[in-house]
């Protein structure tokens, strides 16, 4: 594929961003749906929170295996496979009649969705010239932030006319049609992927700093995706909000944070990346705890909006530090190994733990536990510099 200027590559970038938006929304849509599914199927909070554990587990195995798949069929076909398979899984969710089949199907959704990201990023790197690559990635990364906003609004709209199963089926149809459209289009990379380098993986697994970054990214993903996943239950069960009102507040909170990663990147360049990581986790942890203990009213709304504003600022500095781990010849292998682990823990295990605590006490207590873990992670970050000094 010829590398182009940003304007010439814009059509392909927007197509990919649209696919990533659907890919991400298909996974986070279960957060605003949780109160409805929990009530209809008679689930407790731990069982509802485990939805994200099974999605994250499938995503974990899939993203690790994606290199082997793209090495056989190429990046474009991998993207098409991921998109159509995700849509097909959403269609089958309507036939799940018990918790076991629902969990199994959610695991398959993670398997299907996880194939996309490595091939999507590789396609962008071949589509856009190096001078415009950061801006191309920024356009692509708008998709998950928009997905956070769209999921609760999409949920409210669909539930006005359909059951949650029918709503997911419609989303599945859109995914399948989009995947077919991308496959028939002239966009995409025909290059094949590269299977993971096992020797490089072993080297990284022996590095203490790699596991330290896995811990910090797990907490950072918990502060964004994990808290987002359980926020509707927190607002509906603990604060008595109407589900529609809770989803509107959830969408508002993510709308305000869409552009905040740009500020996080500037702060990392100015004050040092590891200092920003620690400060962001500390502030986010404090806000999460305050959100859990504050009474109803305007302060609750302020904290629900403020918490993700700071949480998303972790990732520019986190990726900058993570991408420098290990020898240069292994490229971004640390990123491709760390992120699946962090998604599994922060986006899967932590929501399940919050739900388990919610069954014993309350979802608010689970948020206090998660916030305390973020504060401890911030202290860890200040002491472990990963080779970087403050104000560098």
Image (spheres, helix red, strand yellow):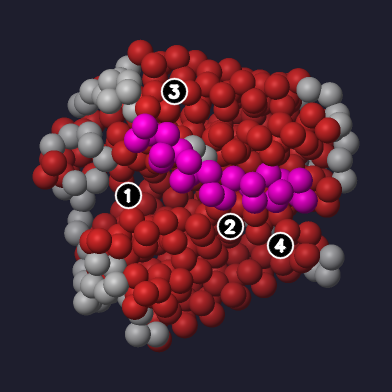
Relative height, residue 150 to residue 335 (above, below): below
Q: Which residue lies at the image location 42% right of the left edge and 34% below the top edge?
A: 267
Q: Which residue lies at the image location 71% right of the left edge and 62% below the top edge?
A: 154
* Image quadrant assignment for residue 237: top right
Instruction: State which quarter of the image contains the N terminus.
Output: bottom left
Q: Is residue 300 left or right of residue 308?
A: right
Q: Earlier in the sequence, mark 2 or mark 1?
A: 1
The residue that mark 4 highlights is 154
Relative height, residue 60 to residue 154 (above, below): above
Tag 2, which secondary structure?
helix
Q: Earlier in the sequence, mark 2 or mark 3?
A: 2
The residue that mark 2 highlights is 146
Relative height, residue 104 to residue 202 (above, below): below
Is residue 80 visible in the rendered structure shown here? no
Q: Do the residues bearing badges 3 and 4 touch, measured as CB atoms within 8 Å?
A: no
Which of label 2 and label 1 is nearer to you? 2
Residue 257 among those drawn in magenta: yes
The residue that mark 1 highlights is 64
Q: Marks 4 and 2, Cα distance to the nearest angstrom?
A: 12 Å
Are there few (<14), some (14-19), or many (20+) residues within 10 Å of tag 3? Answer: many
Which of label 4 and label 2 is nearer to you? 2
Are there few (<14), some (14-19), or many (20+) residues within 10 Å of tag 2? Answer: some
Q: Is residue 304 left or right of residue 14?
A: right
x and y, in percent, of residue 48 in the image: 68, 41
**Span shown in magenta:** 247-270
Q: Which residue lies at the image location 32% right of the left edge and 21% below the top edge?
A: 390
The residue that mark 3 highlights is 278
Q: Do the residues bearing badges 2 and 1 touch, measured as CB atoms within 8 Å?
A: no
Q: Do the residues bearing badges 4 and 2 touch, measured as CB atoms within 8 Å?
A: no
């Amino acid at each position: 594929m010829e590398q182009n200027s940003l304007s010439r590559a814009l059509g392909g970038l927007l197509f990919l961003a649209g696919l990533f938006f659907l890919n991400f929304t298909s996974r986070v849509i279960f957060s605003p749906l949780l109160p409805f599914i929990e009530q209809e199927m008679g689930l407790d909070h731990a069982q509802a929170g485990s939805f994200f554990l099974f999605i994250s587990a499938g995503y974990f195995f899939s993203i690790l295996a994606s290199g082997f798949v793209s090495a056989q069929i190429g990046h474009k076909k991998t993207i098409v496979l991921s998109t159509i398979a995700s849509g097909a899984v959403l269609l089958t969710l309507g036939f799940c009649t018990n918790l076991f089949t629902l969990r199994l199907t959610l695991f398959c959704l993670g398997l299907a969705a996880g194939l996309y990201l490595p091939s999507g990023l590789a396609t962008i790197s071949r589509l856009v010239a190096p001078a415009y690559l950061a801006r191309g990635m920024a356009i692509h990364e708008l998709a998950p932030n928009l997905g956070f906003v769209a999921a609760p609004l999409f949920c409210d709209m669909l539930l006005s006319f359909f059951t949650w199963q029918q709503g997911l089926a419609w989303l599945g149809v859109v995914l399948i049609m989009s995947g077919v459209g991308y496959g028939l289009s002239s966009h995409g990379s025909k290059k094949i992927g590269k299977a993971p380098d096992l020797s490089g993986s072993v080297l990284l697994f022996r590095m203490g700093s790699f596991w330290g970054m896995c811990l910090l990214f797990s907490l950072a993903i918990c502060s964004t995706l994990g808290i987002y996943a359980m926020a509707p239950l927190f607002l509906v069960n603990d604060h008595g909000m109407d589900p529609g009102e809770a989803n509107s507040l959830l969408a508002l909170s993510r709308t305000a944070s869409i552009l905040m990663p740009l500020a996080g990147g500037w702060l990392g360049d100015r004050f040092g990346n590891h200092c920003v990581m620690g400060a962001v986790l500390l502030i986010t942890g404090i806000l999460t705890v305050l959100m859990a203990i504050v009474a109803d009213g305007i302060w609750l709304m302020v904290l629900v909006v403020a918490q993700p504003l700071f949480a998303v600022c972790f990732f520019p500095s986190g990726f900058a530090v993570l991408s420098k781990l290990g020898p240069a010849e292994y490229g971004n292998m640390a990123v491709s190994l760390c992120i699946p682990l962090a998604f599994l823990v922060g986006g899967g295990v932590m929501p399940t733990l919050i739900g388990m605590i919610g069954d014993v006490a309350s979802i608010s207590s689970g948020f206090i536990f998660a916030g305390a873990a973020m504060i401890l992670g911030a202290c860890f970050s200040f002491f472990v510099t990963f080779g970087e000094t403050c104000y560098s």
